[in-house]
Image (spheres, rainbow, N blue to C red):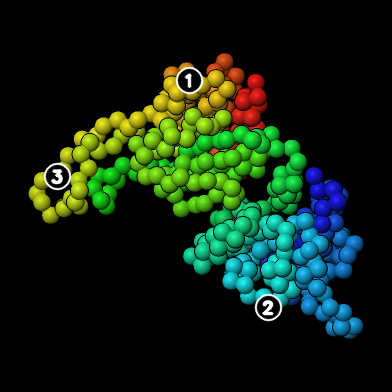
């Protein structure tokens, strides 16, 4: 997919710059031409001689060559590129890109780029979690940049957390998927639910769960990359899709999610029920905040929420594919197989809170995909983005059959 592609690789001043050598080799092996644009601090971590030897091109750092005065045109570089990849992208460079501070060749080239831009952040976990970094990354995402989320693991500080630049192999995989001419879900409409639902007790309290929506949002991005027109019905979460084409419908409660799903399902080819819908809701939510100063402890009477997957299962017409999710703590497979039959599903994805690295709030997951005939496939511990690709490939095959 990358043969003949022109890739501008931006390298900034972080320890993960050492990975850029491997990234260049992988890109070149796949037939891409790579032009490195490096920041002055980037040269402190990896030498231009190494990078030039791998790319076969002079490394660009400054606006002009000091000895000859030759001008390096950021406009020409931007026009030459089929894609620009900034890996590693430090907090400093991300902030400059988000705010248009063009004080070096890399950011100036970025501002001139006409091609898609992929940003692979790399920094310590506290920097990654800082509100300014979070805001700047979301700003870049809103501009249409593709954010290659960093992984969790041991960092240069020897702390453990999110901030490791994604491995070069995964970055190349993202680029290959972007340039892939084969879009197996082109022309298909995919409906997803994701995140938790909040069931109000009063205006300030609710019944909910710990879902962050990461798995559902990863599925939405994967479906969009496969060419689908994606509608994502989302409960309250703090994340956004990476793919700009994903349409998000924000809801709060299970009933709101059910209504939105029923509205969009008839026009969908594939529906994936990934949301962690609260099973119960207060029967009589209060209009005003319940005060604790009273001697009486309130009793909250609960009622069952609608089963959205089962509702769509009853509505399902020929040619539609309906997939559910089951989060279990015990008797997982038996419970999942019961649900696949009772809800008229074409596949159910089982994950368990008892598996380390799986479940709510993690960047990784372990799932088992189960079909109505009992055939199943268990995936090992993987990043949720990778799990999403595997699930979407399985769903695509089911939908074709």
Which is nearer the N-term, disc 1 or disc 3? 3
Is residue 43 left or right of 339 when viewed as pictured? right
Disc 3 secondary structure class:
loop
Question: Which residue bears the numbered disc 1?
Answer: 344
| Measured Cα–Cα span from mark 2 to mark 1 | 58 Å
Q: Earlier in the sequence, mark 2 or mark 1?
A: 2
The residue identified by callout 2 is 103
- Please name the residue shown 46% across and 41% down the image: 233
Q: Badge 2: few (under 14), some or many (20 or more) residues near its Cα, within 10 Å?
A: few
Q: Depth check: 131 or 124 in front?
A: 131
Residue 298 visible in the snapshot: yes
Element carrying mark 2: loop
Q: Which badge, 3 or 2, comes first in the chain's sequence?
A: 2
User: Is residue 249 shown above or below 144?
Assistant: above
Foreground residue among 53 and 380:
53
Residue 213 rendering spot, x and y as whole percentages: 48, 44
Residue 216, position as x, y percentages in the image? 52, 41
Residue at (75, 57) in percent of width and height: 83
Query: What residue is shown with label 3?
Result: 297
Residue 238 vs 196, above or below: the answer is: below
Q: Gap between marks 1 and 3, in whole Å?
A: 42 Å
């Amino acid at each position: 997919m990358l043969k003949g592609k022109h890739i501008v690789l931006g390298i900034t001043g972080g320890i993960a710059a050492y990975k850029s050598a491997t990234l260049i080799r992988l890109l070149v092996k796949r037939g891409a031409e790579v032009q490195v644009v490096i920041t002055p601090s980037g040269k402190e971590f990896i030498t231009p001689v190494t990078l030039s030897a791998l790319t076969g091109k002079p490394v660009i750092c400054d606006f002009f060559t000091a000895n000859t005065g030759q001008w390096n045109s950021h406009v020409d570089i931007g026009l030459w590129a089929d894609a620009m990849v900034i890996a590693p992208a430090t907090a400093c460079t991300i902030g400059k890109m988000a705010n248009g501070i063009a004080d070096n060749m890399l950011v100036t080239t970025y501002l001139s780029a006409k091609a898609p831009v992929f940003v692979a952040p790399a920094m310590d976990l506290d920097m990654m979690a800082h509100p300014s970094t979070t805001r700047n990354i979301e700003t870049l995402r809103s501009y249409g940049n593709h954010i290659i989320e960093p992984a969790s693991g041991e960092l240069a500080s020897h702390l453990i957390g999110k901030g490791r630049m994604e491995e070069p192999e995964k970055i190349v995989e993202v680029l290959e998927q972007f340039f892939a001419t084969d879009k197996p879900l082109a022309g298909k409409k995919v409906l997803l639910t994701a995140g938790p639902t909040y069931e109000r007790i009063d205006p300030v309290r609710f019944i909910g769960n710990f879902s962050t929506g990461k798995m559902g949002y990863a599925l939405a991005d994967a479906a969009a990359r496969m060419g689908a027109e994606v509608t994502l019905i989302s409960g309250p979460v703090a994340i956004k899709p990476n793919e700009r084409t994903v349409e998000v419908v924000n809801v709060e409660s299970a009933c709101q999610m059910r209504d939105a799903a029923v509205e969009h399902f008839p026009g969908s080819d594939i529906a994936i029920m990934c949301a962690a819908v609260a099973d119960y809701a207060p029967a009589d939510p209060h209009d005003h905040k319940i005060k604790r100063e009273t001697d009486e402890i309130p009793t909250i009477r609960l009622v069952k929420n609608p089963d959205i997957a089962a509702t769509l299962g009853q509505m399902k017409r020929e040619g539609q594919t309906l997939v559910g999710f089951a989060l279990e703590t015990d008797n997982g497979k038996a419970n999942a197989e019961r649900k696949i039959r009772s809800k008229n599903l074409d596949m159910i994805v089982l994950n368990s809170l008892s598996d380390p690295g799986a479940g709510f709030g993690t960047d990784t997951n372990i799932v088992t995909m189960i079909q109505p005939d009992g055939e199943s496939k268990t995936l090992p511990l993987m990043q949720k983005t990778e799990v999403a690709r595997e699930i979407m490939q399985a769903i695509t095959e089911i939908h074709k059959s």
